[in-house]
Every structure is written in C-alpha cells, then in structure tokens.
Amino acid sequence: MGGAVSAGEDNDDLIDNLKEAQYIRTEKVEQAFRAIDRGDYYLDGYRDGAYKDLAWKHGNIHLSAPCIYSEVMEALKLQPGLSFLNLGSGTGYLSTMVGLIIGPFGVNHGVELHKDVVEYAREKLDDFIKNSDSFDKFEFCEPVFVVGNCLEIATDSHQYDRIYCGAGVQKDHENYMKVLLKIGGILVMPIEDQLTQITRTGQSTWESKNILAVSFAPLIQQSRADGEKPDTVNLPPVTVRSLQDLARIYIRRTLRNLSSEDGQGKGTVQRVPQKRKRRRCRRRRINTYVFVGNQLIPQMVESEEEEHAEEEHKEVEEEEERDIGDIEILKQVNILRDQIMALPLPESLKAYLLYYREK
C-alpha cells in the first residue's frame, strides 16, 4: 500500500515526489534531503523499500516515513548556528540532515534509548563523512549521540534552539519537553495524534500549531523497582571548537568560495543528465496516517487521475526542446579535494583538511 506520495526509483526521484506534493517547500530542506541518501540508512537486503513513503522498522532500528521527516524539517525552521536536540535520534538520518543546515558553528545532539541503535547511527555517520559525495559540498555540524531515556535528562541541562521528539508524547510530559527549549526556540513533537510545532515566546508562554495528524509509538518510560533511582541522562557538553578545527573550517570555506567564483567567472554551467520523464498524475494530498504493525500508512486511499495523453506528449516535447542547447554536461568532480591536494602542505595536514576521506 502506498503512502502520501508515490514511491521513487531512487533518492532524487523520491524528493521530486515530496516537492510535487508540497511536503518539501524550501530550497535548504531540499538540498539536505538530496545530499543524504535514505537508502544508506537501511540494512542490506531491505534497501528496495527505501524510496517508498513508508516507515521502516527492523528490531530497534526505525525510520519514519519521508513525508513525516519533510514536515519536521520544514517546521523546525533551521538556520546556521542553531543548537538542535533530537530526542529518539534513531539511525541519525534526521540529525545528519539537520547538521548540513545548521553548519559547523551549531550544536547537534541526539538521545537514543537503545545502545545498538546508537552504534548503528555512529557507523552511518562515519560512512557519510568518509565516503559520501555530498560531504565536501556542505559545512557540517557533526551529530553527537548518547544512550539514554529522553524522559530522564538531567534537570540542569542546557537548553536548545530547536528540538524534535520522534515518539508520541503524553500530555503530562509536554511541560518537561518545553523547559528544554530556549526562548524563541521551536519544538516539534507528536502530541495526542498531532504532529505539533511549539514556539517558546517567553519565560512561561508558548504558541502551538498543529502540522499533521499522525500516530506515533509512545515514549518509553524507564521501568524500575520501587525506590530505585532512574539512570540520569547527561547531555553532551557544548564545547568551543579548537583553533586547529577552526582553521580547517575556514580554509575549506575559502577554497570552496574561490572555486565557486572561478566557475562563475568562466561562465561554466554544470548539469547532470536529465532524468527520464515520469508519468504525470494529479494526486490528492493525504494528511492522516496510522501505524499498522510496523508500517505507517494513510487512512485514505490516494486518488490519481491521469492527464490527457496529448497534453503529456506535448509537455515532454517542450521539455526536450528546452534541454537542447550549448550547455556542456560535465562529469562531476570533487574540486575542493583537488584544491586541497594542490596546496604546498605536508600530506598529514592535507589528510586533516580532507577529514581523512579517501576520495
């Protein structure tokens, strides 16, 4: 059974569908979704389902449906330099996308109940930094994950600009979540079957807005014997970057800006080959979802109405005509890496500037 949007053939195709259905509405969110391939966060043997608009669960590993993550990313209104806390950080997929937007001077923390899932998230993060083609195109705030129950966070913990909770929050835990938020900050979480955006407007004032009707599994409360103290979760410290790390950030930024200016000066336009034309359909957006087993599905069946064949054929011809021109299609290369390798520096420093990436 399908989700809110049609399944994609690959990550880009899925993002195209989410844009068409208006789940992704801003350029920065689109760029983050395209940079992180959802399929990379699936276990081997399950990747075929990665580009469907459905939740996926295997053991303790869980990913929400793409349309849910899209709405969350848009509702958080992320900006460079903000601090972010992910309660129930799971595979780290969402935290990694957030890190691409808040940049190296932000704060990116996650709390996850299951130790095996935290280890999985760290493996996926390391793979993204070392192997992803997207890493060198962004300035990144690396997520830091800790194991623990997000209902047991130390009372003296620092506050955050943006918070997301990926599990159903009961009404009596709402204020607990709110106090973790800075004044002016935004909290997104599911409360009473509604994905809700809460903005802290003052010391004891908030504004709430319902985003989407959903059904999430509830937060797990820590079970303990009578009189036994809970295991307090200490969030990662907010640290100042070292001078060495700052130098790496600014050297990479300078080289990236220079390459961008050179490209504009030469008037070079890089394009990737056009994807094949997909059948165009009119779709009705679905805003209500329920869990059945381990799958997130809509309550209403998607309605599709094919456009007239003559109109579709005409659109394809017009698009092909626009694509014909003198624009050179260039093979994508990692210009930043080439620039760093050309610097008159010891190999050890070059490796550091490259985050020890091998490609």
Image (cartoon, rainbow, N blue to C red):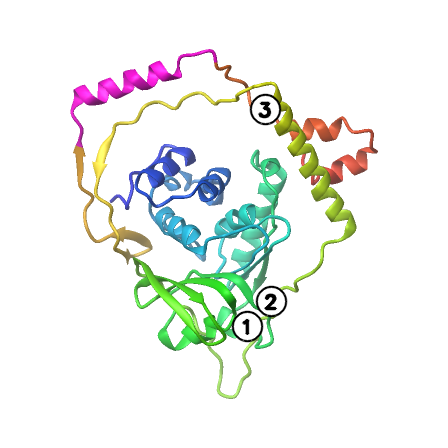
- Name which residue type carries label 1: Ile
The prevailing secondary structure element of the residues shown in magenta is helix
Image position, residue 39 (x, y; %): 45, 40
Q: In the drawing, what numbered circle is on residue 235? A: 2
Mark with earlier residue (1, 2)? 1
Residue at (60, 36) in percent of width and height: 131
Q: Quadrant of residue 46?
A: top left
Q: Is residue 212 shown left or right of residue 323?
A: left
The amino acid sitting under disc 2 is Leu
- Mark with earlier residue (1, 3): 1
For discs 2 and 3, the disc positioned in front in the rendered view: 3
Disc 1 to disc 2: CB gap under 8 Å: yes
| Residue type highlighted by circle 3 | Gln
SS class, disc 1: loop
Q: Which residues are magenta?
A: 306-326
Apparent side of residue 159 relative to residue 283 in the rendered image (left or right): right
In-front residue for pair 5/262: 262
- Which residue was labeled with disc 1? 153
User: Mark number for residue 264?
Assistant: 3
Question: Which residue is painted at 58% across and 42% down in the image?
Answer: 128
Earlier sequence position, callout 2 versus callout 3: 2
